[in-house]
Image: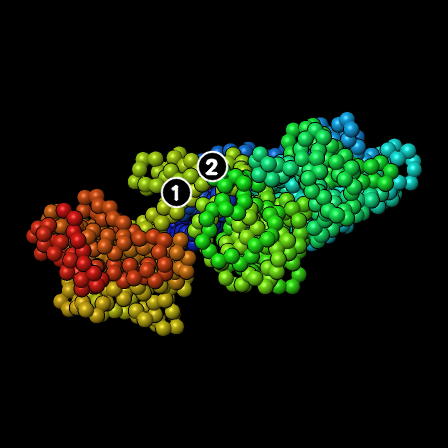
Amino acid sequence: MQLRHLFRHWAESLFAPGQKLRRRYEAFKRLLDRDKRCLERITELEEILHGQVAVDWARVASLVAALRWSARELADSLLEMNPLAHRGLGERLDELDAALAQRLAEPSPEAGPPYVLSLDEAADRPGECGGKAANLGRAARIEGVRTPEGFAVRASAFHAFLAENDLRPRLDELLSRVEPENPEQLDELSAHMQELLEDGAMPGGVAAEAAGAVKEVSGGEGWLWAVRSSAVGEDEAGLTFAGLYDSKLNVPSEGVADALREVFLSKYGSRAVAYRIRAGLPDQDAPMAALVVRMARPRAAGVVYTADGPPGGEKLFIYAVPGLADDLVGGEERGAEYALSRDETPELLKAPEDGPLTSDEAVELARVALRVERAMGGPQDIEWCWDEESGPLVVQARPFAAEAVDEECPTGLPGCEQVDAQVLLRGGERASGGVAMGTVHFPRGHTEARDIPVDAVVVCRTLSPRLVSSMGRMAAVVSPAGSRAGHFASVAREYGVPVIVGAPDPFGTLPEGEVVTVDADTGAVYHGAVEELRARMGRRTLPETPLRQRMQSFMDLVSPLSLTDPTAAAFKPGGIQSFHDLVRYCHEMGVREMFDLVGLGGRGMSGAKRMDTDLPLEFRVLDLEDGVDWERATGMVPPEAITSRPMRAVWDGLTHPEFSWEGAMAHLDEAVFDERMATTAGLVDATMASYAIVSRPYAHLMIRFGYHFAMVDAYISDDPEANYAGFRFKGGGASFEQRLLRLEFLRLVLEAAGFETRIRGDLMDAQVRRSSREDTEEALRLLGVILARTRVMDMSMKDLGQARELAEEFAETYMGRSITAAE
């Protein structure tokens, strides 16, 4: 790469300097574009790292790949401008890129057999069979606990399915575009992903092993099966995916392979994708495994929470419905509630008058649940059914997601705080505890609730799991339906979103559009923001996520910025420690290369046209691209034909109506003047002229006044990050001390206008960057005024006080402000 640029640089410098100017400008435009792209990608990666944006890992990988490509194009653009000055840049980029690629490398997922394991084998392999299958396998080992017969399908079967149909690249492309807070886009992308899986063929090895396991477990009998999701990460502590993946019930033996594909497909349902992304779990870290068990014939079914309630007063709760528990866990039905003590022989403390379980059955189920809790090492959320033949069966067990309880209010009972506020609603029950404040919102239409605003207190008729996709926008939820046993309540507890169920007439008592305070611990809603309860808000924070942990392993190569001072010795390719450093270096050096575009002799300006102006300036203009309206310029270039935005701004300053050029001396350069006097050359010689190299957004001006020269280099666009105005001023006919006084005047004025300045000897450099288009144009107009006003100022300068007085006078006249000069 560098040799190619070196050869072109040498050849054009010798034989085609005009072409070199144009090529450098084209490279500079590309550099600005790549600079912007790199900064955008670095910014987005930082937003993801710090939790401001929720995305899938595929988006992170896509951003990193785009950053690596744009950084290489950025460096290549700078090297094309001047390969000699930036030797070592390509090599340093190669080193950074290789280090980043090494940290991003991931092992290929296992996609080979065995695809099926027994439940006992699955108990010790949650990373292969998922938490649901592993937990059921562990429960099956407990004495006195019965579980359905069945087997587990490993995640390697899912990987084999993706590989068989070449789905991973296409899934990653779609996942990289997912925005969980954009429900319409999420639905569209999820549907596309599910279509890809629906059309996929199940690998022959997976289908064969599943068929063999069905035959072995059933003994060849014609059983019906439940094929359930058991994704890696599902039903583990802090992350349940409750109700977000599909289960297929009453599946005949010959339909198990097709049901597996349906379970695989449910991994990419919109609610599951949104939940997983918000949890910071990369798609590849949550492959789908499956649990295949014999269908029970339940007389009743439901959920057990083995330890629920305030510390020291926990009870065991059973929620039960007749038949299957779909409506209960789906949030459509509240179910009958039984409360029991947690003693070795549980005591029935509360029971419905006409529930689906007898008192003895409730006590027996409680004994089974406590056995599971002891074996699993903590409180459990257990799904069960009462089979007509087998009695109580544990069909699922996972750690119970209990809310954090405020130490200052351990009971969560009314009277904990003395609340002096209007009560709008009381009598609801806690499904997910906590306090929140927000604006009451009634979702329109179906409970997908696409119109839910941020920090809304959502009042809805049922707690459908479909609402989970909007969980990140909710402050709290109030509903007359649902229960603490539903999937929605489980997810809400994970997110720390307060939920009240069984609320009496919330639509009639809570005013839509009004701010309220929800205290789910006491089942009350208050009007307005209740300050007494604010201390209990926001106590829960989500744990460090796998995605953030993975990002932290490489972001030190991406975002830190150590190259902050362009004048420091470390500001060179060898000092680049990150991609951000690389972008900073290339942008700074690219601007510098354009600033040094034309030397004092004007080499490469042979195609320039003279300006038609009344100013005492010999001015030549070289149009690189759309900087001059040539329909209005015949022969010489009148000022009104200039279309370059920065050139127009400088010219407006040079021709400021409050300044007169009458009697101004013609311009010349001291060194060239002496040389030309010896050869009797005239002042209209092109090498004595002032120059402007222009395009519509860009201008590079070298302006000679008397015995000094000034350079202006500027770029103006609608992108503030690309905009800059640079100024360099040197020389003069006065003594060195007088020239320094003029530089003091310039420093005071320019710094008051927002420029950064640096003075070395009698040379000043000043710049303003990353400003709006309007502010950059104003800075350039000011430079034009300064150039006109100060061209012979050094001749009259006497002392520092006079320089400061003149700066104050200039600022008040041309800037409408005062300068407070520092001693």
State the residue position of label 2.
557
At which x and y percent is residue 424? 53, 58
667 over 536 or under it: above or below: below
Q: Quadrant of residue 793?
A: bottom left
Could you say which is closer to the camera, residue 58 or residue 67?
A: 58
Q: Relative to 770, say whether 416 is above or below.
A: above
Q: Outermost residue toward the right?
A: 221
Q: Exactly how many numbered labels are in the figure?
A: 2
Q: Quadrant of residue 153?
A: top right
Label at residue 146:
none
In-front residue for pair 458/53: 458
Q: Is residue 519 left or right of residue 804?
A: right
> Which residue does the image show at 79% across and 30% down from the upper left?
118
Q: Dot 2: few (<14), some (14–19), or many (≥20) neighbours within 10 Å? A: some
* Residue at 23% in and 54% down: 752
Residue type for callout 1: Tyr
Q: Marks 1/2: CA distance? A: 15 Å
Tell me which amino acid carries mark 2: Leu
Residue at 40 percent across and 59 percent down: it is: 717
Query: Which of the labelled discs sits on residue 585, or is there none?
Result: 1
Mark 1: which secondary structure? helix
In this image, 348 relative to 28: left or right? right
Q: Position of residue 634 (x, y in %)?
A: 35, 72
Q: Residue furthest left?
A: 798
Residue at image coords 73%, 40%: 383
Element carrying mark 2: helix
Q: Earlier in the sequence, mark 1 or mark 2?
A: 2
Left or right of 137 in this view: 6: left
Frontmost residue, 438 versus 181: 438
Q: Nearer the viewer, residue 288 or 411?
A: 411
**Is residue 414 in view from this perspective?**
yes
Residue 610 visible in the current orientation: no
